[in-house]
Image (spheres, rainbow, N blue to C red):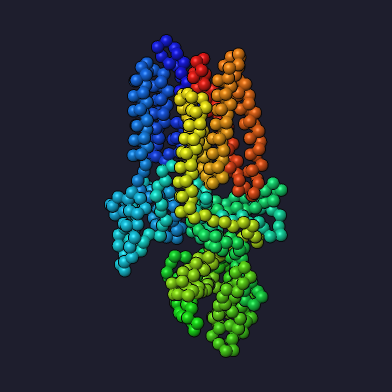
Amino acid sequence: MVLRQKGNKMKVSWRIWVLMFALAFSTVAILNIPSSYSFLVGVLILSIPFTLTFSKSGTTKTILLFITVVALLFIIFFSFQKGVIVTSVNSDSIYFAEGLRKGTVITAVDENKVNNIEDYINYATFNNNESSRLEFQTDQGNFIFLTNKTPDIVVTNIPKTNLKTGLDLSGGARAILKPVNATLSQSDIDDLVSVTSNRLNTFGISDVDIRGVSDLEGNRFLRVEVAGITQEDLKELVGQQGKFEAKIGNDTVFVSGEKDVTFVCRNDATCAGIEACQQDSSGAYLCKFRFSISLSPEAAERHARITQNLILDSSNPQYLSKPLDLYLDDTLVDSLFIGVDLRGAVATQIQISGSGTGATQNEAYDDAIDSMKKLQTILITGSLPYKLEIVKLDSSSPILGKEFTKNIIILGIIVFLIVSVLIFIRYRKIKITLGVILTMFSEAVITLGIASLISWNLDAPGIAGIIAGIGTGVNDQIVIIEESVSKESSTLKQKIKRALFIVVGAFFTIFVAMLPLFWAGAGLLEGFAFTTIIGITAGILITRPAFTEIMRRIQGE
């Protein structure tokens, strides 16, 4: 720390106070702990410069600093919240109807304490013939349900930090899309983002990040990132326009979207579900699904007008001569016979059906469920306003993401050690080495704190940007050290001023060089640019001034 002698006390420089405030604020922003503990952590960090200022004895300072560090570690370790957090609740479920929402923390199930997701699975997984009582104790109060199935909600362990990770670390799929034969304005892109978000949310997918991006040539794209699904799932959801049409002959009766379809039955066995599964002559299985929808008065009038002139089917006189053909993206998915009693009738209730296939009955059943869910989603949200072409499609495994995170932490520790050893070998002063370590650590914490505060998704390029920022910081510190220990006849103040001139020049050079990366590669490198800029900005405003004070103290001025 930078200290200045004043009588029997050591005064801490204001630049170090700025650094400690930044470290306290960033630490609190990163840690996902209750606010009372966050406040205590911040106070303990800020107590460090107070200890250095008002403690006269070196032994006393050491003891107090040791106690402060131990207290910090103790508070952080034991203040993490226990339980699981709800990440998704189906809007048609009884759990949603009773008030259970995304973000609710479940701490116990039927008075059994839940510390993690394994405990939740043990206590909340069952499948009985008869309904039984299920009680959730949460941070929003208690919820009681009568059910015979495992709750239709998605939960995960409560994260220990507020850092949000990208697909590289959490796993999932990403697609870069562009409209076919269309040039979109920013307003068009915003509309496309809204419709696509609505479709994915209705489908029941959480952790979705959809945004409009552009490249250096000004071309606009749609970037979709979804955690926890495969490339094939994402391609199925966004790779098609999802244009649904119900036709009788060449006449369109209704299309998807709220203009024609006012209600779609989901998650209700009385009006939606799998009817039957059967095996065909080739040995494959086929499962039929059906669900009801409600048409708007306009669509119902259209149905009456089109059917009133149809004749009876000569081979099957209880039905009309033409069926209701269902098309998805111009492909016929099913044909429904129209009963005689519906001729010329203003029918607002329509039953939609389809099928799923598979080598086994379970595969066919799952395929039918997926097909029904997709069709329901399209009927609710409507088709995308443009036909989209997938420019790039990639995915990442959550297991690989965890392994990558582990390796990057180990690599960071190794880099810290190597830099520290090289600095010590070069300058032979432990105080200089500790100053460099403190500065590197501070820049990493401040960068992560800002990322947590603005909910920035940290991906592999973002982590690379943090490393690049720290590397730039070490380079700047070496410039300051070299100028400070040089044997020139000028004063230390002049030497440091000359070093800071070089550091500031390097900052502006890197800052300008990073700006194009926000648009290069349809925004895939913006994480690198963002974290690099945050790191070097924190360095030039906070850590470099603090390090110059450290060097002034070490050099005895």
Q: Could you say where residue 162 lies in the image, as x and y percent from the top left?
A: 46, 42
Q: Judge whether 219 appears above or below 269 on screen.
A: above
Q: Judge whether 506 appears above or below 129 on screen.
A: above
Q: Could you say where residue 518 lies in the image, as x and y percent from the top left?
A: 63, 43
The residue sitting at 35% across, 27% down in the picture is: 66
Q: Is residue 366 left or right of residue 465?
A: left
Q: Judge whether 514 appears above or below 484 on screen.
A: below
Q: Is residue 467 visible?
A: yes
Q: Could you say where residue 3 lies in the image, as x and y percent from the top left?
A: 46, 18
Q: Judge whether 275 appears above or below 124 on screen.
A: below
The residue sitting at 65% across, 74% down in the picture is: 251
Residue 488, by quadrant, is: top right
Count the labels in the image.
0
Residue, far bottom: 315
Q: Is residue 46 left or right of residue 385?
A: left
The residue sitting at 48% across, 75% down in the picture is: 359
Q: Quadrant of the N terminus?
A: top left
Q: Could you say where residue 164 lies in the image, as x and y percent from the top left?
A: 49, 45
Residue, far top: 7
Q: Nearer the viewer, residue 18 or 139?
A: 18
Q: Is residue 106 visible?
A: no
Residue, far left: 111
Q: Nearer the viewer, residue 70 or 437?
A: 437
The residue sitting at 34% across, 39% down in the picture is: 78
